[in-house]
Amino acid sequence: MKEIRLGTIGTGVIVEQFLDQVVRTEGICLRAVYSRKYDKGSALAEKYGAGQVYTDLDSFFYAEEMDCVYIASPNILHYPQTKQALLSGKHVLCEKPFCTTVKQAEELFALAEERGLLLMEAVPTAFLPNLNVIREQLPKIGKLRLVQGNYSQYSSRYDALRQEQALPNVFNPAFAGGCLMDLNYYNVYLNVALFGSPDRVQYWPNLHSGGVDTSGILILQYPGFVSQASGAKDTWYDSVFTIQGEDGFIQIPGGSNGLRQVRVVTKTTDETFDLQSDPARLSYEVRRMTDILLREDREAISRLRSTTLAVIAVLEAGRKSGGIRFPGEEW
Ligand SMILES: NC(=O)c1ccc[n+]([C@@H]2O[C@H](COP(=O)([O-])OP(=O)(O)OC[C@H]3O[C@@H](n4cnc5c(N)ncnc54)[C@H](OP(=O)(O)O)[C@@H]3O)[C@@H](O)[C@H]2O)c1
């Protein structure tokens, strides 16, 4: 590919944040927009310079003016829409969480491979330069014992839930909602990206009567250390991610979504690292994914795929242990 000709699904805030970076990035341009509502689609297309607006999903997937789809729909639609995009011959960038089960994820990656298409989960943490800083600094703090991540952000949509006015998608099991699938997802991703798959997973959710978690604590047991991932959409707190080793600790102010800075403290040193001069965290994601697509870097895709699969396995095990079921799940 010389240039990625992109089409988008969804018109939420994240799509605009993504497209803000697409227009700044060489080698990728927006060609088509899908929305259920023509007015919303055409407003987005006009703002970011797309030539075509679709309100019919089948026509969108077969659109000849695009070769890659960015999917930012409610979580439950990621699997069927990614599948349809691949079957229509398009590369896919799918928002986090990639899908709801390992079985679905494996099927999608196998389909992409079979069709020679490129498929990636659009999860900002994976592409942040400070992720590699953490990896490089880990040996300084010695044998790991405790990891704690807290990502808490009071959701404006929680107000509607509290007042029993509505069941927003993000809190609706029919859309694979809940805090573990949303904010706490970032803690899970960071754990898996740094430490791999845990041996055991247990989730203690605060469940809403609608069936999903509005907050909760996930415990990941690794050989020799334990990690606690807390997430909340029903309260707020100063989000932070800390890794404690026998010889020091690493602290990430702001937490797992953004990795703003990496503070590394040992008995004799206290240093802060930051390789992210661009405050727009999605700039790194869009630039790196564009580069991977243009170079058809299958090795990078394979590494990202392994992390995505391991993350989905943790989410699935966590949901099972916490009693969070989505439509059609029978366990
Ligand atoms: N990477 C990040 O930092 C980040 C941040 C926020 C969200 N996300 C992810 O992005 C995805 C979208 O999040 P969101 O908060 O924008 O979700 P959302 O508001 O529930 O829905 C996203 C879009 O999907 C369409 N949609 C809404 N309800 C639908 C329904 N019932 N059936 C079909 N389409 C529907 C809407 O577009 P139209 O009305 O135009 O069709 C809407 O703009 C989620 O998977 C979320 O996890 C990622």
Image (cartoon, rainbow, N blue to C red):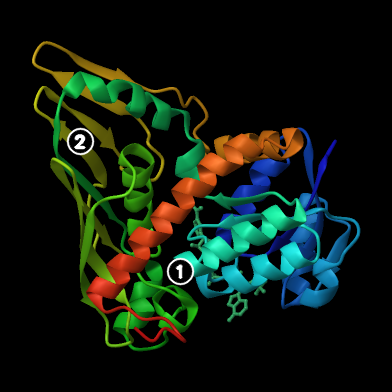
Residue on which the image places disc 2: 243
Question: Which residue is pictured at 58% across the width and 36% down the height?
Answer: 300
Along the viewing direction, whichever of 272 and 141 lies nearer the viewer = 141
Left or right: 33 in relation to 125:
right
Residue 151 sits above or below residue 161 on the image: above
Task: Say what secondary structure mark 1 lies in.
Answer: loop
Question: Which residue is pictured at 18% across the width and 43% down the height?
Answer: 223
Q: Inspect this view and state whether residue 282 appears.
A: no
Residue 113 sits above or below residue 142 on the image: below
Which quadrant of the structure image shows residue 301?
Answer: top right
Q: Mark 2 or mark 1: name the one nearer the start of the chain.
A: 1
Name the residue type under label 1: Thr
Residue 206 % position (x, y) = 21, 74
Residue 122 % position (x, y) = 56, 50
Residue 184 % position (x, y) = 32, 57
Along the viewing direction, whichever of 136 and 280 lies nearer the viewer = 136
**Distance of mark 2 from mark 1, alpha carbons?**
28 Å
- Furthest-top residue in this view: 268
Labelled disc at residue 101 = 1
Left or right: 9 in relation to 135:
right
